[in-house]
Amino acid sequence: MRKGPEKPVLIYDGECSVCRGAVEWIRARSGPEDFEFFSCHSEDLPFRFPHIGKSACLAAMHLALPDGKVLAGELAAPEILLRLRRWRWAAALFRLPGAKILSRAFYRWFAARRHRISRHFGKPTR
């Protein structure tokens, strides 16, 4: 298994206002050492995360963990919540019967429409 970053890195579409909003929500609820936030539009993406292609990065958020494991989309959500002190309880919701199927379907549906949803709420993508 490859060695990962020193702290978890949340890799997201930095040009998507929905994604930026999610990152700001996480940043406001985490400590300074809990996450590094990294836009997949960074020129350093292929150097730091050669195993994450840009198209995959634009399709879903990724969480690169210190043990080298990378979680994408709905698989990253419970791990993120576990690292947010007041939101750890919410990670348990992903272990409920049927939650894996529902979270996967919802994440894919939402991610595919995030730019349209963003425009609907008056927050256009950059």
Image: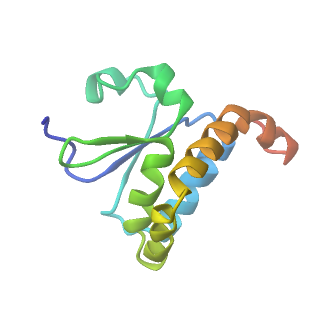
Of 27 and 66, which appears nearest the observer?
Answer: 66
- The answer to whether residue 126 shows anywhere in this view is no
Q: Residue at x 87, y 43 (%)?
A: 120
How was the colour assigned to the protein in this rendering?
Answer: rainbow
Of 8 and 81, which appears nearest the observer?
Answer: 81
- The answer to whether residue 17 shows anywhere in this view is yes
Q: Quadrant of the N terminus?
A: top left
The total of numbered circles placed on residues is 0
Please give left or right for residue 110 compared with residue 75 in the image: right
- Location of residue 27 with respect to 105 vertically, above or below: below
Q: Residue at x 45, y 63 (%)?
A: 95
Q: Position of residue 55 (x, y in %)?
A: 50, 20
Q: Position of residue 46 (x, y in %)?
A: 33, 21
Q: Residue at x 52, y 36 (%)?
A: 60
Q: Position of residue 69 (x, y in %)?
A: 25, 42
Residue furthest toward the front?
97
Of 6 and 60, which appears nearest the observer?
Answer: 60
Q: Position of residue 114 (x, y in %)?
A: 71, 38
Please give left or right for residue 2 compared with residue 110 in the image: left
Q: Quadrant of the C terminus?
A: top right
